[in-house]
Amino acid sequence: MTPHNSATKGDYAEAVLLPGDPLRAKWIAETILDGARCVNRVRNCLGYTGTWKGKPVSVQATGMGQPSLAIYVHELINVYGAKQLIRVGTCGGLSEKVKVRDLVLALTASTDSSMNRNAFGGFDFAPAADFALLRAAATAAEKAGVRWHAGGILSSDVFYQPDGLDSYAVLRAHGIMAVEMETSALYTLAARFGAQAVSICTMTDCLVTGEELNADERQSSLEDMARIALDVAVGEG
């Protein structure tokens, strides 16, 4: 147990899906997993363990933003023995090439956060996905008939940018495809502690074109993403 998690050792599988929203974790567990049981309720940041295609897998909500995710990921790896961590979330599109409903597989994650600056001194660490998991995610998406893109994304600490799309101009000029709020911390911690990680995000709204998913479209797209991530988690990608 930890101050943030009431689970005991052995309650989590080695492969863990990481949605930000606790209700999304609950939905994945109760709708898709077999035999899911709740292993954590602290602060309502819900965690579950069940099976997918006969293999154990867990899902743990992380909350919003890198500081919150960092707490759960640090403890999942160092206290509960997690070895594969797969973020399942949403992102905003920064490229006309990425359409709503497409999956974004984060090769790397730039950030405006001070978390890495504080940890790496004068170095600019480049947080990156685990290649085996990323390749499995691409394969699983192709099998499912879901369009995907692999490339750089931004993990931002700021949701409401004061200058809107103009705030991202220099990053868009360097090929950054999407923006979200967690992946840089996930990849950094996975590298630090020798775990594997990949971030799989559904593009739900495009900051360039203004296109966005309605509620029904968003739900079906998130289900596709969750099933793809579960295939990666159990080695079916």
Image (cartoon, helix red, strand yellow):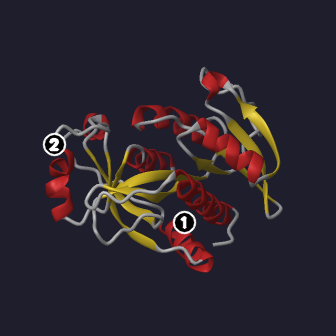
Rounded to the nearest angstrom, the CA distance separating label 1 from label 2 is 35 Å
Residue at horizontal 69 percent and vertical 71 percent from the top: 236
Dot 1: element: helix
Residue 202 appears at what percent x and percent y?
Answer: 48, 59
Residue 210 appears at what percent x and percent y?
Answer: 30, 57
Within 10 Å of the Cα at label 2, are there few (<14), some (14-19), or many (20+) other Cα atoms?
few
Circle 2: residue type: Asp
Q: Is residue 231 left or right of residue 85?
A: right
> Which dot, 1 or 2, sits closer to the camera?
2
Q: Is residue 157 left or right of residue 86?
A: left
Q: Which badge, 1 or 2, is on the more N-terminal residue?
A: 1
Q: How many marks?
A: 2
Within 10 Å of the Cα at label 1, are there few (<14), some (14-19), or many (20+) other Cα atoms?
many
Q: Are marks 1 and 2 in contact (CB under 8 Å)?
A: no
**Residue behind mark 2:** 163
State whether residue 213 is above or below residue 182.
below
Front residue of this view, candidates 9 and 22: 22
Residue 193 visible at all: yes
Q: Quadrant of the C terminus?
A: bottom right
State whether residue 38 is above or below residue 95.
above
Q: Quadrant of the N terminus?
A: top right
Residue at horizontal 55 percent and vertical 69 percent from the top: 137
Residue at horizontal 51 percent and vertical 34 percent from the top: 63
Residue 13 visible at all: no
Q: Which mark is residue 133?
A: 1
Front residue of this view, candidates 120 and 226: 226
Residue at horizontal 46 percent and vertical 67 percent from the top: 102
Dot 2: element: loop
Circle 1: residue type: Leu
State whether residue 201 is above or below residue 146.
above
Residue sticking out furthest to the top: 3
Residue 58 appears at what percent x and percent y?
Answer: 70, 47
